[in-house]
């Protein structure tokens, strides 16, 4: 095995020990592989700061700034690991600043659009019951990430207490409650799920109509299909998570509680989510309080 292959194998093992998701590992591998290819197979552990900067500049010229920022983040993690393993005395990434990514708030989804989306799922068949339950759960405070939604099992669902257990990033577990309508949707889904041909074969909560667990890709496709049927612009699952965060903030839910429900580890995250609607929230708060009306 070539030196770079051996180095990557060691690093990948470390990532698996840290229980990084396959998608995260794939992102790291793409950054490392591209860096190696850019410099014609040179040893990763011998590359200089200037060589890495040249690669990142090339990424920025051919792709977006956000892609370059992702590559920077992945390579920084790799070289920090190399230092920790004493493969290097210092990281060549130490003095390379991350590309500044313009903040583009994710638009929240208005209620009338959500209603149209749910109407597109109307029906009593398996797909209708399943898709309604998924979309409603995505709209709850603590809205699961796509990978979290795909990973849900029957044991994670507690209809007695109307809550669901989420296995999140870094194997962190959180429990999020859900409202009566979501509980009803989940209850109705479980009833039709019992008649699914593979109901006893898989422990996963969401099954495709023809069998096998619904993957993250399948969830994206389901939502895209339902948007098309509803006659609305495409909605990404992440928009529903941002919308849930916006509604939470708009209802004066605390940032501390939001961090618990949504599985955030940084206080910056509650401020970032739902940022596109912060002006609207501020204006409504001003009208509600209206200090001048007291005079």
Image: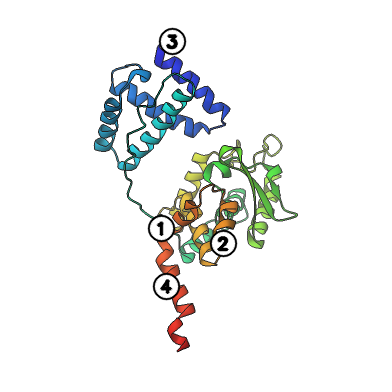
Give above or below for 284 relative to 246.
Answer: below
**Label 4 vs label 1: CA separation?**
17 Å
* Residue most extreme to the front: 89
Could you tell me which residue is drawn at 57 percent across and 43 percent down?
Answer: 148
Q: Which mark is residue 254?
A: 2
Distance from Cα at disc 1 to Cα at disc 3: 47 Å
Q: Which of marks 4 and 3 is nearer the N terminus?
A: 3
Mark 3, Cα crowd under 10 Å, few <14 / some 14-19 / many 20+, is few
Q: Do the residues labelled 1 and 3 touch (CB within 8 Å)?
A: no
Task: Please give the name of the residue rendered at 58% of the width and 42% of the height, measured from the top-left corner.
Answer: 168
Among the two numbered marks 1 and 3 on one chain, the one whose residue lies closer to the N terminus: 3
Mark 1 or mark 3: which is in front?
3
Circle 2 or circle 1, nearest the eye:
2
Residue 293 pos. (x, y %):
45, 86
Q: Do the residues labelled 2 and 1 touch (CB within 8 Å)?
A: no
Q: Position of residue 34 (x, y in %)?
A: 34, 26
Q: Count all numbered tags in the image, as a single digit.
A: 4
Q: Name the residue under label 4.
A: 283
In this view of the protein, can residue 261 be seen by the observer?
yes
Q: Residue 107 carries which label?
A: 1
Residue located farthest toward the top when viewing the structure as drawn: 1
Which numbered disc, 4 or 1, marks the residue closer to the eye?
4
Counting residues from the start of the chain, the first of labels 2 and 1 encountered is 1
Using the image, tell me which numbered label, if any, was put on residue 1: 3
Looking at the image, do the residues carrying marks 3 and 2 touch, with CB atoms under 8 Å apart?
A: no
Q: Is mark 2 on a helix, strand or loop?
A: loop
Label 1: state its secondary structure.
loop
Q: Where is residue 82 in the image (x, y as percent from the top left)?
A: 44, 23
- The answer to which quarter of the image holds residue 136 is bottom right
Residue 140 seen anywhere in this rendered image of the structure: no
Relative to 62, residue 38 above or below: above
**Given the current orientation, which residue lies at the most extreme right position?**
160
């Amino acid at each position: 095995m070539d030196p770079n292959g051996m180095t990557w194998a060691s690093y990948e093992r470390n990532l698996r020990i840290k229980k990084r998701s396959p998608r995260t590992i794939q992102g790291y591998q793409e950054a490392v592989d591209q860096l190696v290819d850019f410099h014609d197979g040179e040893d990763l552990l011998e590359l200089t700061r200037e060589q890495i900067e040249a690669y990142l500049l090339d990424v920025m010229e051919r792709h977006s700034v956000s892609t370059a920022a992702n590559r920077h983040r992945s390579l920084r993690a790799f070289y920090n690991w190399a230092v920790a393993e004493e493969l290097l005395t210092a990281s060549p990434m130490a003095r390379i600043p991350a590309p500044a990514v313009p903040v583009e708030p994710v638009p929240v989804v208005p209620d009338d659009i959500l209603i149209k989306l749910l109407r597109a799922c109307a029906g009593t068949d398996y797909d209708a019951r399943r898709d309604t339950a998924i979309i409603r759960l995505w709209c709850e405070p603590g809205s699961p990430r796509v990978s979290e939604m795909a990973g849900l099992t029957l044991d994670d669902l507690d209809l007695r207490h109307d809550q669901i257990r989420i296995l999140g990033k870094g194997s962190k577990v959180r429990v999020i409650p859900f409202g009566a309508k979501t509980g009803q949707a989940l209850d109705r889904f479980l009833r039709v799920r019992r008649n699914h041909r593979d109901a006893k074969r898989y422990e996963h909560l969401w099954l495709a109509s023809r069998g096998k667990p619904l993957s993250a890709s399948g969830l994206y496709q389901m939502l895209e299909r339902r948007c098309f049927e509803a006659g609305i612009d495409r909605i990404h699952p992440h928009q529903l998570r941002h919308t849930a965060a916006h509604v939470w903030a708009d209802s004066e839910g605390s940032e501390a509680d939001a961090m618990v429900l949504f599985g955030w580890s940084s206080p910056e995250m509650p401020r970032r989510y739902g940022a596109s609607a912060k002006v609207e929230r501020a204006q409504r708060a001003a009208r509600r309080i209206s200090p001048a009306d007291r005079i």
